[in-house]
Amino acid sequence: MRLRNIAIWATALALGTTLTACSSSSGESGSAGSETVTIGVTDLSKDYWTTFTDLAAAEGIDVEIQNFTDYQQPNPILTQGGLDANQFQHLLFLANYNVNTDEDLTPIGATVIFQLGLYTSKGYTSPSEIPDGGQIAIPNDVTNQARALLVLQSAGLIKLADGGNPLSSPADIDQSASKVTVVPVDPNQTAVQLQSLDGAVINNNFAADASIDPTTAIYSDLQDPDSAEAYINVWAVRSEDVDDATLNRLVEIYHDPSVIDAVVEENKGTALAIDKTPEELQEILSGLEDLIREQG
């Protein structure tokens, strides 16, 4: 349940993050009759969080949001009890955390899939126009490299052995059945490769850094959401809190049109709202954890 103690706070502070006041049972903190819930995020500057907290407050839920710049902190702090929930990661990130730490943080709701897009500066308007033997840059970090390969396969440009999976590497490409070759580069160099290669798969943040409009992608995994299930962003809680009524109500509030539509608009339509059930998300997570253990 949502409990806190001094030892937990000391551990959390040792991780270098200053946390807000701890959660409490109804009426013990915040305004009279309200319940305080602490959530960890990485995008607190976005306006939709104000809309979200206002909607929650109208229902007597005082939401305290702690922002993190280090993606490695929200999960351990949630595990240790310094947060009631976090909302910053996709299922594959969560699966890696659970397997590597032998923990069992659990998704109770989906948010969106943020696109991973294929871009070009050569005038192609669709993947089919990229010539045979073309070269495509992909990010070389493990998570995004596999996702980029799945994007290219979905776009009909490569074929992966056994259909590929979220841990695929360039070694899994069936070269004889593929139209293009891939050039793995540091993620922050993918946009630069547009100057010389036929295309590049570029993360949204690096596209933004290069002043690339994300809506100009000629293909993205949002066009094949089933291939991107591992990258559904989720609300995560400790396993004992999966049935907590307040936390589950916050997931519902996040999907209020005034919030979720603002998330999509903030990303110029390059985010796809997902409304899978907790059970569906937990099944996907379990499959990813099994895959990581098998291939680890």
Image: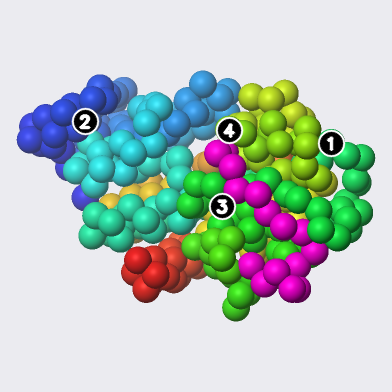
Which of 47 and 139 lies nearest the eye of the viewer?
A: 139
Magenta region: which residues?
A: 173-187
Secondary structure type for disc 2: loop
Which of 35 and 271 lies nearest the eye of the viewer?
A: 271
Residue carrying label 4: 188
Is residue 183 shown in magenta? yes
Q: Give the CA separation, mark 1 to mark 3.
A: 21 Å
Name the kind of residue labelled 4 in the image: Asn
Q: Position of residue 119 (x, y in %)?
A: 77, 42
Q: Which residue appears farthest toward the bottom when viewing the image?
A: 162
Residue carrying label 1: 121
Q: Earlier in the sequence, mark 2 or mark 4?
A: 2
Q: Position of residue 287 (x, y in %)?
A: 44, 71
Is residue 128 shown in magenta? no
Q: Give the CA separation, mark 4 to mark 1.
A: 17 Å
- Residue located at (50% from left, 52% from top): 143
Residue carrying label 3: 145
Q: In the rendered view of the protein, which quadrant contains the C terminus?
A: bottom left
Q: Earlier in the sequence, mark 4 or mark 1?
A: 1
Q: Which residue appears farthest toward the left when viewing the image?
A: 7
Verify CB contact (< 8 Å) between mark 4 and mark 3.
no
In the image, taking residue 6 as reference, residue 100 lies left or right, namely: right
Tell me which corner region of the image, top left, top right, bottom left or bottom right, holds residue 191. top right
Q: Position of residue 11 (x, y in %)?
A: 14, 34
Q: Give the CA separation, mark 2 to mark 4.
A: 27 Å
- Residue located at (37% from left, 56% from top): 96
Which of 34 and 131 lies nearest the eye of the viewer?
A: 131
